[in-house]
Amino acid sequence: MIYLASRSPRRRELLSQIGVRFHLLLFRDRVGEHAEIDESVLEGESAAAYVERMARAKADSGWRRMLQRNLPPAPVLAADTALALKERILAKPRDRSEAAEMLAALSGRRHEVLTAVAVKSYDHVEFALSSSEVLLKTLSPEEIAHYTASGEGDDKAGAYAIQGRAARFVVELRGSYSGVMGLPLYETSQLLERLRERRNPY
């Protein structure tokens, strides 16, 4: 059994899909899961370094919350997803205006989707990174406006959800579909297996 330090319904569904038993490590502050974490991109930081830093910070935050609440100790899993469009990092849009701007930037172009997964158990952290390449079709202003108005991309990295209405925009995907959704299942299962082996070496 693990704790999932995320409110994402997609990550809950994906963990259940591969038979991982978990409890949600819910946060009292619904405004932000990890209010104490600054999610700003550091100057010169790559997308891969950014999602790794965020995933590790969220796992640490979840572990502290678990201890503060005197919950039974168990590994804490956290993840973070961002898009890389050349040197630009696209995380979650602040509002629908920014979401529309992100989709316009992604229209007709290839981009990289990176999802980092971290599992913390006491002083040890297991980490995995998934990288996928996605090509979106050229989107018309009307398509962008209609999609952003649906609200589906409000809390999604890059302002779209590949498993939802935006699936019709995807021309090509190279890599992990579940990774683009927000939790790469192969990497996550391998990470949890390494953690089990570490806890039970014989």
Image (tube, grey):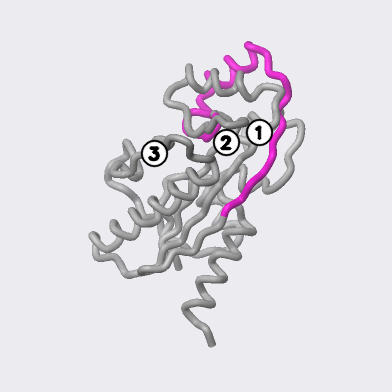
Q: Is residue 78 left or right of residue 139?
A: left
Q: Is residue 142 magenta?
A: yes
x%, y% of residue 199? 47, 78
Q: In the rendered structure, are the residues bearing label 2 and label 1 in contact, judged by CB atoms less than 8 Å apart?
A: yes
Q: Is residue 157 left or right of residue 28?
A: right
Q: Is residue 58 left or right of residue 35?
A: right
Residue at label 3?
A: 39
Residue range (magenta)? 129-158
> In front: 147, or 38?
38
Disc ID at residue 111? 1
x%, y% of residue 104? 61, 18
Disc 1 crowd, CA 10 A, few/some/many (<14, 14-19, 20+): many
Residue at label 2?
A: 83
Disc ID at residue 26? none
Quarter placement of the N terminus: bottom left
- To which quarter of the image does residue 35 belong? top left
Indicate whether 153 appears above or below 115. above
Disc 2 crowd, CA 10 A, few/some/many (<14, 14-19, 20+): many
Q: Residue furthest top?
A: 142
Amino acid type for the residue under numbered disc 1: His
- Residue 94 visible in the snapshot: yes
The alpha-carbon separation of the residues under discs 2 and 1 comes to 7 Å
Amino acid type for the residue under numbered disc 3: Glu
x%, y% of residue 75? 42, 66
SS under mark 3: loop
Amino acid type for the residue under numbered disc 2: Leu
Indicate whether 49 appears above or below 128. above
Q: Residue furthest right?
A: 171
SS under mark 1: strand
Indicate whether 127 appears above or below 201. above
- To which quarter of the image does residue 166 belong? top right
SS under mark 2: strand
